[in-house]
Image: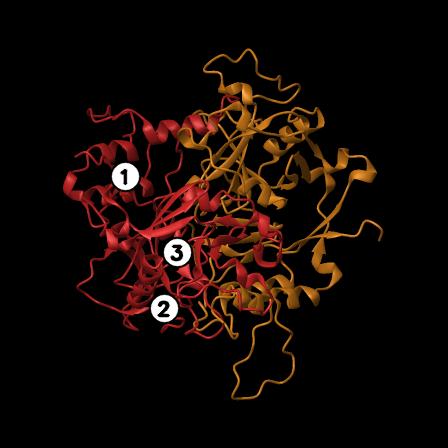
Chain colours: A orange, B red
Amino acid sequence: MPQRHPLALALALAIAAFAVNVAADEATPAHTPSAKELLAKSKPQEWRVPDPQNLLVMQLPQGKVVIELAPDFTPLHVANIRTMAHEHYYDNLAIVRVHDNFVTQWGDPASDDNGNNSKLKSLGSARSTLPPEYTRPFDAKLPFTALPDGDVYAPEVGFSEGFPVARNKATGQEWLTHCYGMVGVGRDNDPQSGSGSELYAVIGQAPRGLDRNLAVVGRVLQGMEFLSGLPRGTGPLGFYEQPSQHVTISSARLMSDLPEAQRTKVEVLRTDSATFAALVEAKRNRHDDFYQFPAGKVDLCSIAIPVREASTSR
Amino acid sequence: MPQRHPLALALALAIAAFAVNVAADEATPAHTPSAKELLAKSKPQEWRVPDPQNLLVMQLPQGKVVIELAPDFTPLHVANIRTMAHEHYYDNLAIVRVHDNFVTQWGDPASDDNGNNSKLKSLGSARSTLPPEYTRPFDAKLPFTALPDGDVYAPEVGFSEGFPVARNKATGQEWLTHCYGMVGVGRDNDPQSGSGSELYAVIGQAPRGLDRNLAVVGRVLQGMEFLSGLPRGTGPLGFYEQPSQHVTISSARLMSDLPEAQRTKVEVLRTDSATFAALVEAKRNRHDDFYQFPAGKVDLCSIAIPVREASTSR
């Protein structure tokens, strides 16, 4: 029945197939467990609850976007973003740019005025410039789960504290990578010109050439589809040409600043857990009724880090 | 002025900066030419006009999508798609699935009916099943422009006839890769179950694990933003839950079947041209006022192949 959404059917089987835990017939190739199956068997301690001070909750007309900040990689930028969120700087700012296969960007829409900055919203007590923080010194105390298949851009890649990371022991540096859903800080040519007042999220093929050139401050945990599924801007660099196209951010708050009733309990699978390792391996070598040729490899930015919303009642 | 779309400003400079062809002061690092500058200097013979029989022109409410088919890689599938386009099979079909960071998929919306295929549109004289064509035998006569920085998934990658390609001389195979904008044929578990009646385009991080498991039939040359910028489906696997969300394809025709007045002259930069090589190198090693650390590397799916619409009057 090839007309019946065949790819979908096949992927449905691949993703949600009934667990095959019985001893496989020797003539039958083993079925790789699906992500759903692996997650169903995960242990509670394999999930972490991010610090509510590291969660930025942004309200769009389409829904809620939750970003986990990464203070161990970009501490000064995260502190500045926390200050701006705390002082409601982001409220009524807007998504002003959706550049296809690149980034969705938000900030002060008044900056569209060519050169006239008088209408710009005040940064309040936040700093207007910051040191770059494009990389950080390698720290053996940070957890690191290495991937086995290499990387085009860096000597070593893997995950640290739930974020995709590259590192180079020769230079003693590590840095967050521009994978899908990662959030960075826009800046001008001056490397010190970024403040966090203008942020972007990656919505296409990972633009890894940006790595080590911009401060990456976190990852979208929830609501990524609201940032990626917007009409593309038709102006240069994907800017919206009409203010009426801007998508208004009604508010952006740290989860820790929200009233208790509005908080949600987001959990992220630990990237140093056994279940995460099993997910990576299942992605590398998938044997099931659909896949004819398991890749045997996986690249850093193709790995999804599971997120779930725990019941607030427990 | 970090509030004034700093990333955009910087990228604007990086992309469209005035040519710096004067001898650089020894104290000043050389500026890498922008893509715009390189293309402005390209020669007419570096551009090719795809065979109109290889261009599928699909009309959506948002605009026109033009797909270049790849008969040298998937000849039977391309022939079947040509038959279906010629017989107007795709007319009034719809985009039924937009799976975030994965694929936008279109086909017969009647296949939503669970198991009831009686309402499905006839495939006419097209074949309902086809041999897989997931890879093709290596052919030294096909042009191949190799990339220098390796690949996580394949021994060798590069471009052939305007398409991203991987190859493995040890197995004697080459295949089109699932980069952003590539178009493939949905199928059921049976490897022979694909026909081309259901197609998908990649809209996120390249799902290279699909390589060699599906027939890849071409690449979106124009209108990719209409496929990628759609609201994501909220059903399982990104299917739209309501028929009212479907995006209707009013028609899909081969360019060669269109009346002369409706044809456009699309040109694609040859991937074996000197200008394309210069673009790749400029992407690998960008030195300008914005970039602090040129990557020195580039991955296959991060390279855009330039397309332009030539004036029909010339």
Marks 1 and 2, Cα distance to the nearest angstrom? 29 Å
Of B236 and A78, nearer the camera is B236
Task: Verify CB contact (< 8 Å) between mark 1 and mark 2.
Answer: no
- The picture places residue A300, in percent across and down from the top left corner, at 49, 54
Above or below — where is A74 with respect to A166?
A: above
Mark 2 or mark 3: name the one nearer the start of the chain. 2
Task: Between label 2 and label 3, give the one nearer the viewer.
Answer: 3
Element marked by disc 3: strand
Q: Which residue is mark 3?
A: B183
Graded by Cα atoms within 10 Å as few (under 14), some (14 to 19) or many (20 or more), the crowding at tag 3 reads many
Is A70 displayed left or right of B34 in the figure? right
Element marked by disc 1: strand
Q: Which residue is mark 1?
A: B308
Of B261 and B225, nearer the camera is B261
Mark 1 or mark 3: name the one nearer the start of the chain. 3
Given the image, on which type of amino acid does mark 1 rest? Answer: Arg
Above or below — where is A118 with respect to B166?
A: above
- The picture places residue A301, in percent across and down from the top left corner, at 49, 52
Is A7 displayed left or right of B82 in the figure? right
Q: Which residue is mark 2?
A: B134
What residue do we see at 58% from left, 28% from top? A94
Task: Between label 1 and label 2, give the one nearer the viewer.
Answer: 1
Given the image, on which type of amino acid does mark 2 rest? Answer: Tyr
Whether residue B285 is visible here, answered yes or no, is: yes
Number of the label disc, if any, that sits on residue B201? none
Is A253 displayed left or right of A305 in the figure? right
- The picture places residue A188, in percent across and down from the top left corner, at 45, 25
What residue do we see at 44% from left, 47% from top? A205
